[in-house]
Each structure stands twice: as structure tokens, then as C-alpha cells.
Amino acid sequence: MNIIASFAPFILFAVLLHLGFVQAALWAGAATACGLILRDRLMRGRSVKVLEVETAVLFAGLAAYTALTGQDWTIPMVRLVVDGGLLLIVLFSVAIGLPFTLQYAREDTPPEIWARPEFIDANRRITLAWAGAFAVLTAADAMMAFMPQIPHWIGVLLTVAALYGAVQYTRTASAGRPA
């Protein structure tokens, strides 16, 4: 599932962030997104993915902003900004009629079905499921940033449940896509 690999920048970001390396986590997210772009384009001959380009821009922009301003992020605040940015990227893809999952789905399906309404609709639903997960992540981040009296484990549980749900929905819905 190549779509899951596209979230590698966010996974590396989360790991480095929780080790206390905020700026390194942002730069690593940008570098990983750029690496995915190069891997797909140069090594695999695949199309450049909008999600990966916008992820690279998001992380590089936040890293540059942090370096230039000396912004001192708390872990919940930088996660809130990153997850909120990811949510906006995904919602934008739906708003312009090109759900981000279409590029991934087209790599695994014959070109003659790409224009079918049910194919496009399935990808819109999968993208909206991811948007829902990212909305939960953003809400959990906001809760951890602005309501420290709420136990941290609740935010973590919400995050894990939302991501698990999106992955499971993607697997189930992808299996039902027309082939």
C-alpha cells in the first residue's frame, strides 16, 4: 500500500519530535518527503504525488520559519500545526475534485477505469476517511496543547484509533474498488 509509505515523513517527524528534536524533526520530514518524490519519479518512473510535494513544502516551510524566527515549539503545538496542515492538504485535494488517493489508486488499476464515477467516488470516500482521521489528530493535538489537565494518554489513544480506522477503511474500500 504505497499510500501508507507517503506518511513516512510524518512518522519520522513524530519519532524525532518525541526525542526532543523539533527543528531536526521538521527538516527530516521535509527531506523524507523529497526522498519519496525522487524515489517515485527517478527510480520507479511513477508520477510525482501531490501529497508528497505538499508535505515537503509544509515541513520545509515550518522548518525555515522555525530557523528564521527562533520559534520555540512545544510538542503539542508543533504537532497541531503539522497535523492541521496535513488536514488542509487532504481537504484541498477533495475541494478541487482530485482526492489525493487517486494518484495512488491509478498505479494499481487499469487506465480504462480511471474515469469511472464509482472509481472516483471510492477515492473521494477514502480521502474523506483520511480527512476525518486527520481532523481527530488535530483535535487531539489541540486538546493536548490547550487542555493539559486532560490526561495525555487520551490524545494518544484518539490518534492511534483515528489512524487505525483510516488504514482499515482504506484497505476495505480499496478491495471493493472496480478493477
Image: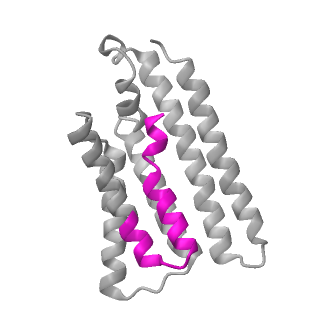
In the figure, residue 64 lies in which quadrant?
A: bottom left
Identified at 33% across, 48% down, the residue is 36
Identified at 57% across, 39% down, the residue is 129
Q: Position of residue 109 (x, y in %)?
A: 38, 18
**Magenta stretch contains residue 9:** yes
Q: Position of residue 34 (x, y in %)?
A: 29, 55
Q: Position of residue 46 (x, y in %)?
A: 26, 33
- Secondary structure predominantly adopted by residues drawn in magenta: helix
| Figure coloring | one colour
**Magenta stretch contains residue 157:** no
Identified at 53% across, 64% down, the residue is 14
In the figure, residue 136 lies in which quadrant?
A: bottom right
Q: Is residue 51 above or below residue 102?
A: below
The part of the chain drawn in magenta is 1-28
Q: Is residue 64 above or below residue 171?
A: below
Q: Position of residue 168 (x, y in %)?
A: 64, 34
Considering depth in this image, is 149 or 59 the residue closer to the camera?
A: 59
Identified at 48% across, 58% down, the residue is 10
Using residue 76 as the reference point, say whether residue 27 is left or right of it.
Answer: left
Q: Is residue 144 above or below residue 132?
A: below
State the quadrant of the C terminus: top left
Using residue 144 as the reference point, say whether residue 3 is left or right of it.
Answer: left
Count of marks placed on residues: 0
Considering depth in this image, is 170 or 99 the residue closer to the camera?
A: 170
